Image (tube, helix red, strand yellow):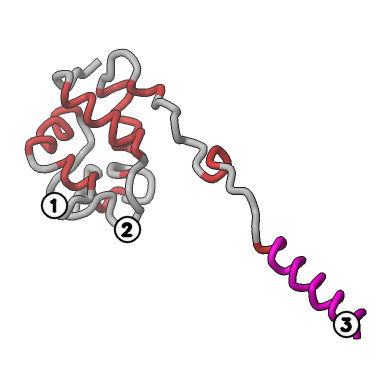
């Protein structure tokens, strides 16, 4: 009878301790406390913004040519500096922040990272430099 009690206690302790683990914040959230290198220094369309727009909105990437490429089903191409600069006035940041004030972008591709949104916002805040 004592052996059964010891086994029950042992199994219970193993179950309790097996369910506990240490969450390492750095492993769970590797970006906490890190800065976005792309927002350090000058942010320009050519160097910083165009790669994001091309990948997620323009002629390549998950949005493809049909969304904001040269053949734009949205009637809002995001191919040139002028296109993207104009889109800022048409709620670009509402769309990428997915705050409900504009259609969420990129459409069907999930939200841009905080770093990518930060790059776009810094570009706007510093005067939308082209080069």
Q: Residue at x 32, y 50 (%)?
A: 63
Percent position (x, y) of residue 29? 49, 42
Residue receiving disc 2: 108
Mark 1 near mark 3, Cβ–Cβ under 8 Å?
Answer: no
Query: How far is the residue under mark 2 from the one under mark 1?
Result: 14 Å
Stretch in magenta:
1-18
**120 relative position to 12: left or right:** left
Q: Describe the element under mark 2 as helix, strand or loop.
A: loop
Q: Quadrant of residue 122?
A: top left
Residue receiving disc 1: 102
Q: Residue at x 90, y 80 (%)?
A: 2
The numbered mark at residue 69 is: none
Percent position (x, y) of residue 30? 52, 37
Q: Among all residues in the image, which is located at the extreme left? A: 89
Residue receiving disc 3: 4
Q: Residue at x 25, y 31 (%)?
A: 120
Mark 2 near mark 1, Cβ–Cβ under 8 Å?
Answer: no
The mark that comes first in sequence, 1 or 3, is 3
Q: Describe the element under mark 3 as helix, strand or loop.
A: helix
Query: How far is the residue under mark 1 from the one under mark 3?
Result: 65 Å
Q: Describe the element under mark 1 as helix, strand or loop.
A: loop
Query: How far is the residue under mark 3 from the one under mark 2?
Result: 57 Å
* Secondary structure character of the magenta stretch overall: helix
User: Which image quadrant: the C terminus?
Assistant: top left
**9 relative position to 113: left or right:** right
Q: Is residue 125 magenta?
A: no
Q: Among all residues in the image, which is located at the extreme front? A: 2
- Give neighbour class at mark 1: few <14, some 14-19, many 20+ (Cα, 10 Å): some
**106 relative position to 13: left or right:** left
């Amino acid at each position: 009878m004592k052996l059964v009690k010891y086994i029950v206690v042992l199994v219970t302790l193993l179950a309790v301790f097996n369910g506990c683990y240490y969450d390492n914040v750095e492993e769970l959230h590797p970006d906490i406390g890190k800065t976005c290198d792309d927002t350090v220094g000058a942010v320009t369309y050519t160097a910083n913004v165009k790669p994001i727009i091309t990948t997620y909105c323009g002629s390549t990437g998950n949005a493809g040519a049909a969304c904001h490429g040269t053949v734009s089903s949205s009637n809002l191409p995001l191919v040139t500096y002028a296109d993207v600069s104009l889109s800022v006035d048409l709620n670009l940041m509402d769309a990428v922040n997915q705050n409900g004030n504009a259609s969420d972008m990129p459409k069907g591709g999930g939200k841009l990272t905080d770093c990518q949104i930060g790059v776009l916002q810094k570009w706007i805040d510093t005067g939308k430099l082209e080069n």
